[in-house]
Image: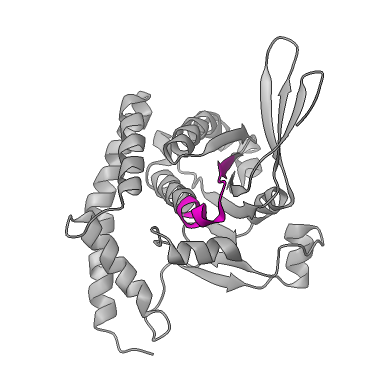
Amino acid sequence: MSTEDGFEFRRRAKGVVWVCDIVDSSKYLNDDEFLDNMEMYLPRLHWTAVTLVRAAGGEFIKWTGDGFLAWFEMELHRELERKVADVLMAAWHLTVLNNITRLGVPTPAAFRLRHGITLEQDALRSSITYPGGHRSLDLIGRSVVLAFRLAGIRANFPSVVVQGDIAQAQENGPFNAITFKHWHPTEADHLRYFKGETWGTNTLYVSAGSARPSNANLHFLERVKKTIEAATGRAPVDARAKAFALDFATKLQEGPAWASRAFEEYVQFLMHELLAGAENLVAAMENMPQA
């Protein structure tokens, strides 16, 4: 630990970094047609993100102006699969809630989110206390920087880009609702997204959206089936995921009026449209010839 005049550094154990970013936020802020919508949307996203991160067992480090940085610390490497499940579950729910409800903002704008998730092995956490008592937090580390850069990369739903360690932990962990595929940045990608840096870019994965049935990804069909069984009560639900969902739902219902309305809309979508769509997808995939 190092301190000087209200500036404190503390070396943290390893953990999972989650950076969330609003797509095209500058465009909306510079457009008079959507400026009022953004001014309503930004504090709602902040409130939702803080609530969601805490429900998932993480620490909300800071608001970045058009997104946030969150930290999920762990002491032992064997905790990785559980921590990754917590983060990806939270990112998935935030994305779906946002896409369905726009957090209750009446706007034609498609406010979308992107996520960068990495494993930080050697984080440095800073706490700065200013005159008057205001305190700010920040997190420093190579994988923290990488997470910010990954959050700017386009990917299919739910718009998540991760390191290989995260993708592997998700595959073996209790939450595997997201399908990832390996992404190889080109030279142009390195300049555009990473400012020419190559550290950490060899094993990157992007969310791939819906997978097509093939001999190589039949496990995707089984995962969808298990999700449907859990949602309909035909299979046990992970206790931690259940606790997270209950905590988050309670906070939404007890929160501002817009949050309660958004929660009702969200539940209706999950229970009817999304579940029905998943069941139709399974039926269609089971009747398609394998590649």
Q: Answer yes or no: is residue 155 visible.
A: no
281 relative to 208 in the view: left or right? left
Residue situated in front as seen by the camera: 3 or 228: 3
231 relative to 247 in the view: left or right? left
Above-or-below relation of 177 to 123: below
Estimate the x, y position of residue 135 in percent, counting from the top left: 67, 20
Quarter-of-image position of residue 98: top left
The span picked out in magenta is 70-84
Quarter-of-image position of residue 259: top left
Query: Was residue 154 drawn as part of the magenta stretch in this picture?
Result: no
Q: Residue at x 58, y 33 (%)?
A: 35
Q: In what quadrant of the picture does the C terminus appear?
A: bottom left
Estimate the x, y position of residue 275 in percent, counting from the top left: 25, 58
Above-or-below relation of 6 to 165: above
Q: How is the image coloured?
A: one colour
Residue situated in front as seen by the camera: 15 or 164: 15
